[in-house]
Image (tube, helix red, strand yellow):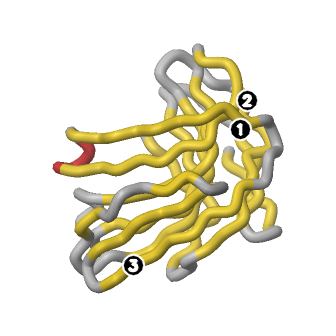
Amino acid sequence: MYRYFGILFGHLKASIALLSVTGLTAGGHGAVWLGASNPQATRWVQAGIETTAGDPGYYLYIEIGRDKGRNDSLWRWPTTQQHVAHVRLFHQGTYWRVLIDGHESHRVWLPHGLSIAALEDMAPGRIRSLAVINDKTVRGY
């Protein structure tokens, strides 16, 4: 089950850091990100920092989701814990793209796109996470 904390709408840029994620179990992950989605959340583009159970370390990433998440594309680059990443969204009409620390996505068609920033976790058990979005501390329990 996905859980979201510190949700911000309408921002086109953000400074983000994933400070800690504890309690991860198999199949779980924690992430902080900025992205854009259509209102049905069936298509999106986002960039952020994540850590995943069974895959030690922290990663910058760009994700493009289509068809309700059945066709995701994910690009990842290693980073350090507590790294502050700078993320920007750009849109022209119904096309959106995202940039994180110099890495850029291609354009994604998102009619009625809405920008969102959040701390996200997903796992069958209880996760505790801590992040910073635009200089504000966000806790996930």
First in sequence: mark 1 vs mark 2: 2
User: How many residues crowd mark 3 within 10 Å: few (<14), some (14–19), many (20+)?
Assistant: some
Q: Mark 2 and mark 1 in contact (Cβ < 8 Å)?
A: yes
Above or below for 122 versus 101 = above
Q: Viewer-proximal residue, 128 or 76?
A: 76
First in sequence: mark 3 vs mark 2: 2
Residue 133 at x, y = what percent?
A: 72, 64
Residue 121's quadrant in the figure? Answer: top right
Q: Mark 2 and mark 3 in contact (Cβ < 8 Å)?
A: no
CA gap, disc 3 and disc 2: 35 Å
CA gap, disc 1 and disc 2: 5 Å
Taking the spot 80% from the left edge, 46% from the top edge, the residue there is 83
Above or below for 15 versus 91 = above
Going by the numbered disc 3, the residue's amino acid type is: His
Going by the numbered disc 1, the residue's amino acid type is: Arg
Q: What is the count of numbered marks?
A: 3
Return the residue at label 1.
128
Residue 10 at x, y = what percent?
A: 51, 82
Return the residue at label 2.
22
Residue 37's quadrant in the figure? Answer: bottom left
Figure quadrant of the C terminus: top right
Taking the spot 54% from the left edge, 43% from the top edge, the residue there is 61
Question: What residue occupies the far left of the structure in this picture?
Answer: 67
Residue 43's quadrant in the figure? Answer: bottom left
Going by the numbered disc 2, the residue's amino acid type is: Thr
Return the residue at label 3.
91
Q: Nearer the viewer, mark 3 or mark 2?
A: 3
Residue 126 at x, y = what percent?
A: 61, 31
